[in-house]
């Protein structure tokens, strides 16, 4: 039997690991390969991840961690991701499987918020639960309380440092206080409401009205947990848009006065001078008898679709990469017919990757797992770049897209806005005919929104109003792999996530996006 050598890891490590575009791509590929067991967790792969961590945006690192949902990453990769920012660590720590020895070795390196996630799990070995309890005093007791021990430092003890005996005494005091608090709660009525504040990452840092340990460290992005404290997608979606929310459903596990179901409402807070987002301030109350407060889990279909998407992306990237190597003769001389065929394969793989990305985006919107940032985006230069990318398609169709002379600035996640506009214009351009011109116009839609009005292609005229959203089967003349209807539904849903909308009229499509607040031109996110 011939031996096979899998050089996937070699290909990734030999690529660009240092540039602003290469490092995030390498990070995603390595995390996916190691996390799903496609390659062994070799030290050099982990060292490569550690070396490029600071070059990879936090949003990319968090997304790659969320993408491992349902996988069983090795212990070394779990440790590397768990000691990262809380937004990266939480998705991994929710489901990771390791031995008792590996968990106990990891605990000292974790942040208090990360250890809080493990406290809410009920499937960890008993030794890990006992080890977590030993960190209770370290996580929750902030001040130096050596004066309460009733003894003076002995000779030879360093001043200003915690002695071992002091730490042991504080841990014992913590356990006594915790047991007393449990006894008090069991004999009294549970708290009915509390107030809280979060930091800019959505993690609760202050609480008043209930015991602090069960609530401090909870995140607004805790939706979808199978066990432990959890919050539904209402709060998570509002957090990504920096919007207020009402009656999000929260469940806190445990035996404290905070345990049970809550309805949570909160408003975002911003610095008055700079306008920088600082977190949320809100309240929680017990639901009435006629209200339900169980957090809603994401649809199973959306979770399954995301899993399939991530299984498809890696081999498709590999196919495109090897086809490019053949086309450019990186491995040696190749006959012209084979180079032509490799070029076709690469183009088709690129189209397939676009469809995979669309499916992933749709699944993230469906499961309230889409992460969006904030920024100021100039529309005209962005649209000009998109139209330039569509030049080959427009030439083939014999049509054109006409842009307005003026510029408008909107607010939102730049990559999401670019994806929305590119997907929408590509879909409309693929429906144009010979000599057709699609005119784009900007308009102010009230004080809070900008409207982008786009002429509707004549080929879509036979589908009145929003009937165009249901033409997924009409793909013969459609330049999109998943169909015009799917593309327009995706654009509409993404526009809603950005705080706007898509209105489809008989002769016009109107895309609404949040208008940017007045600011200097230097604050605009350029291409």
Image (tube, grey):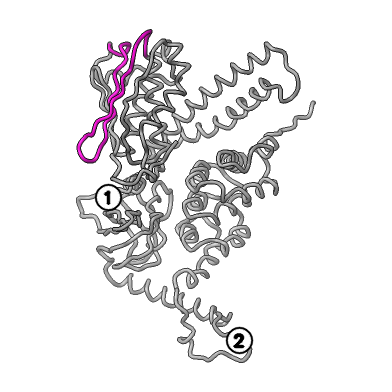
Q: Is residue 261 visible?
A: no
Residue 411 is labelled as: none
Residue extending farthest top: 434
Q: In which quadrant of the rendered view does residue 404 lie?
A: top left
The answer to which of 268 and 20 lies nearer the viewer is 20
Classed neighbour count for the residue bearing mark 1: other residues with Cα under 10 Å, few (<14), some (14–19), many (≥20):
some
- Image coordinates for residue 137, horizontal then vertical, percent: 48, 73
Q: Please check the rendered image and state whether residue 239 is part of the magenta-colored stretch, yes or no.
A: no
Q: Which residues are magenta?
A: 432-461
Residue 306, horizontal then vertical, whole percent:
47, 35
Percent of width and height locating residue 527: 45, 36
Question: Disc number at residue 244?
Answer: 1
Quarter assignment of residue 323: top right
Regarding mark 1 in the picture, which secondary structure is present there? loop
**In which quadrant of the rendered image does the N terminus lie?**
top right
Q: Where in the figure is residue 64, as x and y percent of width and height? A: 52, 43
Residue 330 position (above or below residue 128): above
> Is residue 448 highlighted in magenta?
yes
Q: Which residue is mark 2?
A: 157
């Amino acid at each position: 039997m011939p031996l096979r050598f899998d050089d996937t890891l070699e290909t990734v490590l030999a690529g660009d690991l240092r540039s602003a575009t290469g490092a995030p791509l390498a990070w995603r590929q390595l995390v996916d390969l190691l996390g799903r067991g496609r390659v062994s967790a070799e030290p050099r792969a982990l060292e490569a991840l550690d070396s490029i961590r600071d070059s990879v945006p936090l949003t990319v690192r968090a997304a790659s961690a969320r993408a491992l949902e349902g996988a069983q990453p090795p212990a070394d990769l779990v440790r590397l991701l768990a000691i990262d920012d809380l937004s990266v660590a939480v998705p991994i720590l929710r489901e990771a499987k390791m031995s008792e020895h590996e968990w106990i070795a990891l605990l000292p390196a974790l942040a208090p918020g990360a250890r809080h996630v493990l406290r809410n799990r009920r499937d960890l070995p008993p030794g890990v639960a006992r080890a977590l309890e030993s960190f209770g005093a370290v996580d929750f007791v902030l001040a130096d309380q050596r004066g309460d021990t009733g003894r003076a430092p002995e000779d030879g003890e360093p001043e200003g440092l915690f002695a071992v005996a002091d730490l042991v005494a504080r841990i014992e005091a913590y356990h006594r206080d915790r047991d007393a608090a449990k006894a008090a709660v069991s004999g009294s009525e549970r708290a009915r409401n509390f107030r809280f504040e979060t930091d800019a990452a959505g993690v609760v840092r202050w609480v008043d009205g209930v015991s602090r340990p069960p609530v401090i460290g909870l995140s607004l992005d805790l939706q979808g947990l199978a066990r432990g404290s959890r919050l539904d997608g209402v709060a998570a979606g509002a957090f990504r848009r920096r919007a207020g929310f009402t009656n999000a459903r929260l469940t806190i596990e445990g035996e404290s006065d905070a345990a049970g179901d809550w309805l949570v409402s909160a408003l975002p807070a911003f610095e008055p001078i700079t306008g920088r987002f600082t977190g949320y301030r809100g309240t929680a109350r017990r639901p009435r008898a006629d209200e339900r407060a169980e957090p809603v889990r994401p649809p199973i279909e959306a979770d399954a679709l995301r899993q399939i998407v991530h299984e498809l992306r890696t081999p498709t990237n590999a196919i495109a990469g090897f086809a490019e190597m053949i086309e450019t003769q990186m491995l040696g001389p190749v006959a012209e017919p084979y180079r032509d065929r490799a070029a076709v394969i690469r183009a088709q793989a690129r189209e397939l990757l676009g469809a995979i990305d669309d499916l992933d985006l749709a699944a993230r919107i469906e499961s309230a797992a889409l992460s969006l940032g904030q920024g100021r985006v100039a529309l005209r230069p962005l649209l000009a770049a998109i139209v330039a990318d569509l030049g080959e398609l427009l030439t083939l169709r014999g049509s054109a897209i006409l842009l307005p002379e003026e510029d408008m600035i909107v607010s939102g996640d730049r990559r999401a806005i670019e994806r929305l506009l590119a997907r929408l214009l590509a879909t409309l351009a693929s429906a144009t005919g010979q000599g057709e011109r699609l005119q784009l116009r900007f308009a102010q839609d009230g004080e809070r929104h900008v409207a982008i009005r786009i002429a509707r292609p004549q080929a879509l005229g036979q589908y009145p109003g929003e009937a165009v959203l249901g033409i997924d089967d009409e793909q013969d003349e459609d330049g999109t792999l998943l169909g015009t209807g799917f593309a327009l539904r995706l654009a509409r849903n993404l526009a809603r996530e950005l705080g706007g909308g898509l209105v489809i009229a008989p002769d016009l499509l109107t895309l609404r996006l949040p208008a940017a607040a007045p600011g200097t031109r230097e604050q605009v996110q350029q291409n």
